[in-house]
Each structure stands twice: as structure tokens, then as C-alpha cells.
Amino acid sequence: MKKALVPEFGWCMEQKRVVESLEGKINELERQLVSLKQERQEVGEKLLQRSKQCFQSQGQLKKIEAELKNSEPRCMQLESDLQDTSCTLGALKALLAE
């Protein structure tokens, strides 16, 4: 009877080692899963933050574009005034040269 129990005991011990090894691997995988979830959350937060910054930048860009468009008539007027002044200055120089 004892001889029959010894092989079964050895088999049980081997199964116990296999189970312990698998439990260790499961624990390691659970730690990795927690780490990956945390990393995913951090990446998600960074992505959200960058999306907000991009959205704000787009708003600022549209505002700048609108300001440029609104200033275009004023720039054209200043350019015209500058040409008029240049012509007037040229005429005055011509009169003084005479």
C-alpha cells in the first residue's frame, strides 16, 4: 500500500509546483495589466490635454486670421497714403529744384 502512495505523492507535489508556478505567472500578468492600465490612462490624459491645446490653438489662429482680414483695408489705405505722400514729396522736391 505504501508503494502505491509514493508515486501518487510525487505526482501531487509536481502538480503543486505547476500550480504555484502558474499562480506566480498569473500574479505577474496581473501586475503588468495594472501597469498597462495606468499607462493607458496617463496616455489618454496627455492626449486629452493636447487635444484641448490644439483646439485652443485653432481658436487663436482663427482669431488672428480674422484680425488680419479686418486689417487688410487699413493696410491698403496706408499704402495708398504712402504713395500719395511720395508723389507729393516728389513734387515738392521738383519745385525746390527749380
Image (cartoon, rainbow, N blue to C red):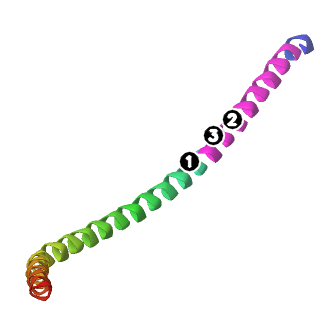
Where is residue 31 shown, x and y percent of the image?
Answer: 65, 47
Q: CA distance from mark 3 to mark 1?
A: 10 Å
Q: At 68% across and 42% down in the image, what residue appears?
A: 27
**Circle 1 residues within 10 Å: few <14, some 14–19, many ≥20:** few
Circle 1 — which element? Answer: helix
Where is residue 70 shown, x and y percent of the image?
Answer: 12, 78
Camera-nearest label, 1 or 2: 1
60 or 67: nearer the viewer: 67
Which mark, by number, is residue 75? Answer: none
Circle 2 — which element? Answer: helix
Q: Which residue is mark 3?
A: 29
Sequence-wise, the earlier of marks 1 and 2 is 2
Quadrant containing the N terminus in the rendered view: top right
Give the answer, above or below, for where 55 lies relative to 25.
Answer: below
Is the magenta region chiefly helix, strand or loop?
A: helix
Q: Is residue 25 magenta?
A: yes
Left or right: where 34 falls relative to 65? right
Magenta part of the protein: which range? 6-32
Camera-nearest label, 3 or 1: 1
Q: Which residue is mark 2?
A: 25
Q: Which residue is mark 1?
A: 36
Q: At 75% across and 24% down in the image, what residue appears?
A: 15
Q: CA distance from mark 1 to mark 2?
A: 16 Å
Q: Residue furthest right?
A: 2
**Circle 3 residues within 10 Å: few <14, some 14–19, many ≥20:** few
Circle 3 — which element? Answer: helix
74 or 40: nearer the viewer: 74
